[in-house]
């Protein structure tokens, strides 16, 4: 088979100074602290995600950047200018809301042009910019349709076009794909990333969907209870989680609680595993093992053995759940085959230790 030549991708040029710099931001609703000392920087032309469960503070942070909330402490700088006291309508920031909020009586073209007309942009300039944006989002042929005649994915593109056409320095997106069904959502994840590259703009998206964040973002800040648990690339979050929460929230993981030792971690019922960490010896720790890092082996090679209690065929791979004596929960293993093990089989297994991680267990 002939492999086609790959056209080199020109990397995005980013300045050394961050576009957005959030410094020690706190925000409270009465006695409830929604944000606790949030500090992070976002680069120019970056696709950045704020990820976390409901109530973690991600939407409050987004609204603080937009100017709809005023932090009780800290600063939010855009291009080095403090926005904290600047009202929302004076910030070079645009926000695309979860509901899209399209005008039902206006055509696609007029919906997109509305913001430009409100700012007094000359008609010829407005038409040119609207035409350019509609081409980018793939809606040129639907310019005269009204929102009721569009699919959910198309309405999402209209809302995005309306937000982009004003050329903000920063575009904020609050759960932009939550109203779409699974198939359309997957397609729009790729489209959003493509559009972000084409328009050369910084996107900050809020989502509780880890798959959505992992597929689109250059970097992700994982929030929990008002704090940033970890800020990293998608690969970094998955392969090297910094906390037990991140390990459990990002992807699937087998978590084994034990005690840190000078040699690694001691897990009751399983033994000691030579996985390096910087935790003090004797402190509570958790061994994080991704399902694909659990290997089914013959009995003579096995570190441990157990009984298969379930299998899930997922197309290109299967997840096998194995009940191991002394463990409260079955150990999940991902294998790239359909029928490698059946219910009731006794199997041997071991961990790919160089790929495993030890994190602190604050609840231990």
Image (spheres, rainbow, N blue to C red):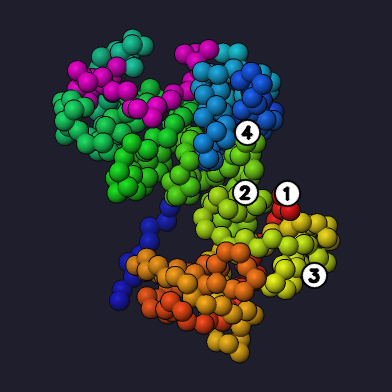
Give yes or no for contact between labels 3 and 1 (Cβ–Cβ under 8 Å).
no
Residue 26, quarter of picture: top right
Q: Residue at x 69, y 30 (%)?
A: 37
Q: Give the residues in magenta.
A: 87-114
Q: CA distance from mark 1 to mark 4?
A: 17 Å
Q: Position of residue 360 (x, y in %)?
A: 73, 53
Instruction: Work out how far the residue at label 2 is from the one at label 1, CA to CA, in angstroms.
Output: 10 Å
| Residue identifier under label 3 | 263
Residue 160 is situated, as x and y percent measured from the top left of the image, at 34, 31
Q: Name the element at disc 2.
A: helix
- Circle nearer the N terminus (2, 4): 4
Residue 242 shown left or right of residue 340 in the figure: right
Residue that label 2 marks: 245
Residue at 30 percent of width and 34 percent of height: 157
- For numbered disc 4, what is the local secondary structure? loop
Q: Which residue is mark 4?
A: 226
233 is within the stretch colored magenta: no
Instruction: Look at discs 1 and 4 and give the one toward the viewer.
Output: 1
Horizontal relation, residue 271 to residue 334: left or right: right
Q: Which mark is residue 125?
A: none
Q: Point out residue 171 in the picture as x, y percentages from the top left corner.
A: 45, 29
* 165 over 247 or under it: above or below: above
Pointer 1 or 4: first along the chain: 4
Task: Give the CA separation, mark 2 to mark 4.
Answer: 13 Å
């Amino acid at each position: 088979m002939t492999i086609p030549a790959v056209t080199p991708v020109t990397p995005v040029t980013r300045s050394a100074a961050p576009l957005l710099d959030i410094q020690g931001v706190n925000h409270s609703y009465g006695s409830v602290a929604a944000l606790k000392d949030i500090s992070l920087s976002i680069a120019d032309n970056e696709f950045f995600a704020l990820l976390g469960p409901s109530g973690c503070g991600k939407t409050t942070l987004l609204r603080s950047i937009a100017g709809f909330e005023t932090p009780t402490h800290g600063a939010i700088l855009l291009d080095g200018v403090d926005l904290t006291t600047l009202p929302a309508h004076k910030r070079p920031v645009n926000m695309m809301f979860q509901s899209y909020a399209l005008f039902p009586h206006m055509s696609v073209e007029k919906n997109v042009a509305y913001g430009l007309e409100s700012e007094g942009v000359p008609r010829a300039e407005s038409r040119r910019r609207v035409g350019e944006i509609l081409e980018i989002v793939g809606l040129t042929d639907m310019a005269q349709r009204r929102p009721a005649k569009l699919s959910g994915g198309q309405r999402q593109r209209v809302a995005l076009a309306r937000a982009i056409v004003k050329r903000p320095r920063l575009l904020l997106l609050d759960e932009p794909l939550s109203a779409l069904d699974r198939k359309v959502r997957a397609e729009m994840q790729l489209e959003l990333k493509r559009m972000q590259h084409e328009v050369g703009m910084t996107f900050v998206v809020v989502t509780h969907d880890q798959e959505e964040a992992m597929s689109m973002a250059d970097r992700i800040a994982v929030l929990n209870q008002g704090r940033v648990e970890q800020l990293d690339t998608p690969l970094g979050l998955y392969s090297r989680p910094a906390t037990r929460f991140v390990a459990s929230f990002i992807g699937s993981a087998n978590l084994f609680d034990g005690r840190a030792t000078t040699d690694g971690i001691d897990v009751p019922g399983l033994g000691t595993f030579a996985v390096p960490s910087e935790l003090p010896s004797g402190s509570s720790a958790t061994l994080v093992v991704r399902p694909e890092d659990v290997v089914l082996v013959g009995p003579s090679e096995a570190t441990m053995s157990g009984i298969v209690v379930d299998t899930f065929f997922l197309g290109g791979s299967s997840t096998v759940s194995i009940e191991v004596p002394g463990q409260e929960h079955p150990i999940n293993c991902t294998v790239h085959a359909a029928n490698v093990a059946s219910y009731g089989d006794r199997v041997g297994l071991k961990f790919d230790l160089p790929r495993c991680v030890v994190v602190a267990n604050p609840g231990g």
